[in-house]
Amino acid sequence: MPEQGFYNLFIMSQSNQISKAVISRLPRYYRYLRELIEAGTERISSEELSRLMKATASQIRQDLNHFGGFGQQGYGYNVKSLYNEIGKILGVEEVHDLIVVGAGNLGRAIVRYKGFGAHGFHFCALFDIDETLCGKTINGVRVYHTDELESFVLNNNVDIVALTIPTDGALKVSKKLYELGIRYFWNFAHTDLELPGDAIVKNVHLLDSLLELSFTVSRSKIKEEE
Amino acid sequence: MPEQGFYNLFIMSQSNQISKAVISRLPRYYRYLRELIEAGTERISSEELSRLMKATASQIRQDLNHFGGFGQQGYGYNVKSLYNEIGKILGVEEVHDLIVVGAGNLGRAIVRYKGFGAHGFHFCALFDIDETLCGKTINGVRVYHTDELESFVLNNNVDIVALTIPTDGALKVSKKLYELGIRYFWNFAHTDLELPGDAIVKNVHLLDSLLELSFTVSRSKIKEEE
DNA sequence: TAGATTGTTAATCGATTAACAATC
DNA sequence: TAGATTGTTAATCGATTAACAATC
């Protein structure tokens, strides 16, 4: 058993390490809590929430306790305050500046989606190599030529870069942006970015997602034929 | 120990139960193998592939062996044949008929994306409530009014429905489609669909995805301030 | 045949679930 | 206070990794 001070430090640094499984469930909690607020529910027990979300009450309590004791014995959780706490954890109370590289349908869909703004996401600019798009404005966000990407990043705060361009461009642009100091990427290109370990990439691989579904469709067809 | 026949049956039905974790890795294998083919690589060992994909060789061999012994001792895996085998498993050799409900930016982006066709996905129709879109054609796919959805589904083969409409519509439309016999949903609406257990839903929750990234951004900011 | 590498079993690790003492 | 429900520890389950015999 190490010295007390050491031990606490160890515990603290451990508690920072939230597993990916837990993180990936937070937005879903957030979503259900919002619905509960809208339905006028004031408090909820982990048991009730588990029935609603088709999870175990145990998992909910474990997950939430990674971040602090938000509940109260004999009462449960206050919906509004839990919602706010999870919001804080997810960072919705800060402003995150994003740029979108690729002003195709996907890039435009993202910039136009109403839901992001309410959670602190601020789209600063779109970039595209198509000169006919440059200078235009999509949902109040201006399209610049990709040539201007570097100077934009150097002169403006950019927290997250969304990549909605094909594979080759995404690899090239992400490397360049990494060199310029960008560390957070929301990648829609159908490839894994090749970046150093401190870059954080969240992938949205639409073809992969559809293939998983296709796998199940094909499986069930085989079963039907049996 | 049960009778031999019984036991084999048990083993077989077990082997059908591939875990979600394994399934979710298949499209990635498929992707890397394609790249290897394009690079002209003829054979690869699990060890080499593991270095490339940043996984363990053990996991790769375990994963592949759920579906059969595709490798050869002392040789490794033949890239082309492994690619084809995984393709078959994912169902890319069959045609999957899809319709897209919601002809907004996201729906249009999906229908226009070039990559799906090569993997057996065939987009039959788009649906929207916006009458100014109806009758138009996007990348060769006609937009119908949502009123025509029911009759379309009854008169055409539809394997998968992509939902690219807001929450309320998605809940309503998915229930209706379930009643009409549809079981596979690719859901982009920011909600969990409320459908019976035999419906298979693959969610693409963009806000959830971005919030996960936001969580990490906020975390690292806290660390920097410490 | 010898070397390489798989397929597969066994060991480990991590995540989920169950149980219950703490406490509102 | 009694009942309810959390926070948290312990047990279980499943997934990943390691090891190695089988075999090309």
Image (cartoon, coloured by chain):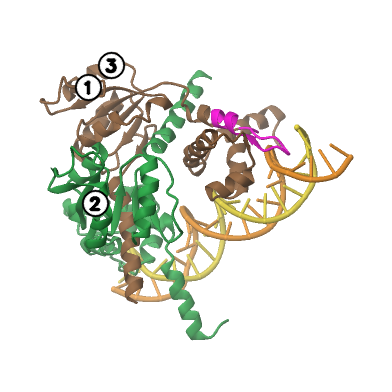
Chain colours: A green, B brown, C orange, D yellow
Residue D7 in the image: x percent, y percent? Answer: 38, 70
Instruction: Let me know if residue B224 appears in the view.
Output: yes
In this picture, is C7 found above or below A158? above
Whether residues under marks 3 and 1 lie with C-beta atoms below 8 angstroms apart, the answer is no
In terms of secondary structure, where does tag 1 sit?
helix
Q: Quadrant of the N terminus of chain A?
A: bottom right
Front disc: 2 or 3:
2
Give percent across and percent down for residue A110. 23, 44
Q: Which residues are magenta?
A: B68-85
Q: Chain of mark 3?
A: B
The residue that mark 3 highlights is B154
Q: Position of residue B12 (x, y in %)?
A: 61, 31
Separation of marks 2 and 3 at Cα, in angstroms: 51 Å
The answer to whether residue B135 is above or below residue B218 is above
Q: Is residue B19 a member of the stretch shown in magenta?
A: no
| Badge 2 element | helix
Are the residues under badges 2 and 3 in a single subunit? no
Q: Which residue is mark 2?
A: A148
Residue type at mark 1?
A: Leu
Judge whether residue A26 can be spotted in this image: no
Residue identifier under label 1 = B149
Find the residue positioned furthest to the top: B155
What is the chain identity of the residue bearing mark 1? B
